[in-house]
């Protein structure tokens, strides 16, 4: 069975939630904050990361993710319902009965933070706000967002509408994995159907390598911000909730992450990691290769190690198929397993009577 690149194991997840001690040098104004490496999910810095808080318009990342996974085409025309046209807060000033493409609404929702656009998207994709909120909560559960609950697509304040800094980082990871969504959040400005949207995320101009994601504010929630930046093949996610000085907070966390961590590749897909003797074949040995590339963020004084787990297998008997798992390679950091990949034969191994000759082998094999 193939495993995704850098698959987190249960032990690795516990380890990933422990930021390095020297992260104390980072100071933020936020009540809650997280810095996470996107590929692995390793937390590099955390401050009160699991407390449930209001998240304001950063909610719209979940709205967009659910909408894009709903099966609706971005080219679909959406007729704006009266319920959407009158939503409070930031607005695109949509008019009831007008027709706007779903893609335009998503851009307006994520760049300009239009609450009317978010409401129209939710109603179009699910039929009702209640049904769409149910889909948002299903997605949150799927992503492991255990301190989150959604009641609306806009982020307007509600006692039962909340998340945590860590959960929002998990959401950001999922959003970055959807190309259409990542492309929207990194856009500085667009003109669509006669409307111009300018991204509220100032980090796109102020921070080198910024690739999105979403701002938010209400009086009760304070300033909320989810951002991501990429440098030298490493993508970091920063989240702050109720942060009076959020732009500086994010710059400080991202600077810390890029200065102290880098991605280290422990195993490359197709890399030969060992050889086993083969009986019953003209080929005396066969190499076992890793099926996946395994990378992990490492800091000063850290290094990755690999361990082969063959389940007691010391030799093979022909024939052997190339795509059959023969064991696995584990990647460890500080003694903790942080990822694994199946091992399989580099090439099929035939019996010495030339199994690959077809029906003759079937007849005499």
Image (spheres, helix red, strand yellow):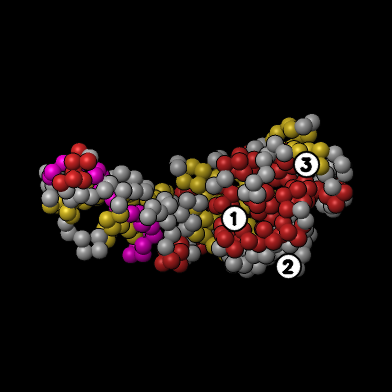
Residue depicted at 38% across the width and 57% down the height? 339
Asked if the residues shown at circle 1 and circle 3 are in contact, with their CB atoms under 8 angstroms apart, the answer is: no
Q: Which residue position is annotated with label 2?
A: 160
Tell me residue 184's x, y (percent): 64, 40
In this orientation, does residue 325 appear? yes
Residue depicted at 75% across the width and 68% down the height? 159
Tell me residue 327's x, y (percent): 28, 58
Q: Residues within 10 Å of mark 1 (few under 14, many from 20)?
A: many
Q: Which residue position is annotated with label 3?
A: 78
Residue depicted at 56% across the width and 59% down the height? 143
Q: Quadrant of residue 149?
A: bottom right
Distance from Cα at disc 1 to Cα at disc 3: 26 Å
Q: Where does the N terminus fall, quadrant-wise?
A: bottom left
Distance from Cα at disc 2 to Cα at disc 3: 29 Å
Mark nearer the N terminus (1 vs 2): 2
Q: Quadrant of residue 104?
A: top right
Point out the stretch of residues depicted in magenta: 333-356
Tell me residue 117's x, y (percent): 77, 46
Label 3 element class: strand
Tell me residue 68's x, y (percent): 64, 46
Label 1 element class: helix
Q: Height in image: 36 above or below 161?
A: above
Q: Residues within 10 Å of mark 2 (few under 14, many from 20)?
A: few
Mark nearer the N terminus (2 vs 3): 3
- Name the disc covering residue 171, or none: 1
- Name the disc covering residue 39, or none: none
Q: Quadrant of residue 331?
A: bottom left
In this orientation, does residue 61 appear? no
Between 296 and 87, the residue placed more toward the observer is: 87
Q: Is residue 337 magenta?
A: yes
Between 214 and 203, the residue placed more toward the observer is: 214
Q: Residues within 10 Å of mark 3 (few under 14, many from 20)?
A: many
């Amino acid at each position: 069975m193939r495993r995704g690149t850098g698959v987190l194991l249960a032990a690795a997840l516990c380890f990933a939630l422990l930021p390095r001690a020297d992260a104390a040098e980072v100071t933020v104004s936020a009540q809650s904050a997280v810095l996470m490496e996107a590929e692995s999910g390793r937390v590099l810095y955390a401050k009160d990361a699991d407390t449930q808080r209001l998240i304001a318009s950063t909610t719209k990342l979940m709205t967009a993710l659910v909408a894009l996974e709903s099966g609706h085409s971005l080219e679909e025309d959406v007729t704006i319902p009266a319920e959407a046209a009158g939503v409070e807060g930031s607005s695109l000033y949509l008019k009831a009965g007008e027709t706007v493409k779903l893609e335009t609404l998503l851009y307006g929702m994520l760049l300009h933070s239009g609450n009317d656009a978010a409401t129209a998207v939710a109603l179009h994709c699910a039929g009702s706000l209640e049904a769409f909120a149910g889909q948002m909560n299903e997605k949150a559960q799927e992503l492991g967002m255990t301190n989150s609950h959604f009641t609306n697509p806009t982020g307007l304040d509600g006692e039962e509408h909340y998340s945590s800094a860590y959960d929002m980082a998990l959401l950001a990871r999922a959003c970055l994995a959807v190309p259409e969504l990542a492309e929207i959040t990194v856009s500085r400005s667009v003109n669509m159907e006669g409307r111009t949207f300018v991204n509220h995320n100032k980090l796109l101009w102020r921070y080198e390598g910024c690739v999105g994601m979403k701002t938010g504010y209400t009086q009760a929630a304070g300033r909320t911000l989810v951002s991501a930046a990429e440098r030298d093949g490493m993508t970091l996610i920063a989240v702050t909730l109720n942060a009076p000085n959020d732009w500086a907070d994010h710059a400080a966390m991202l600077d810390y992450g890029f200065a102290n961590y880098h991605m280290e590749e422990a195993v490359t897909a197709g890399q030969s990691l060992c050889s086993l003797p083969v009986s019953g074949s003209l080929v005396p040995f066969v190499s076992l290769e890793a099926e996946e590339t395994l990378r992990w963020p490492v800091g000063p004084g850290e290094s990755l190690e690999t361990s082969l787990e063959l389940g007691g297998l010391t030799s093979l008997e022909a024939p052997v198929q190339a795509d059959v798992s023969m064991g696995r390679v584990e990647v460890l950091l500080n003694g903790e397993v942080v990822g694994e990949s199946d091992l399989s034969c580099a090439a099929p191994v035939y019996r010495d009577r030339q199994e690959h000759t077809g029906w003759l082998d079937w007849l005499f094999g």
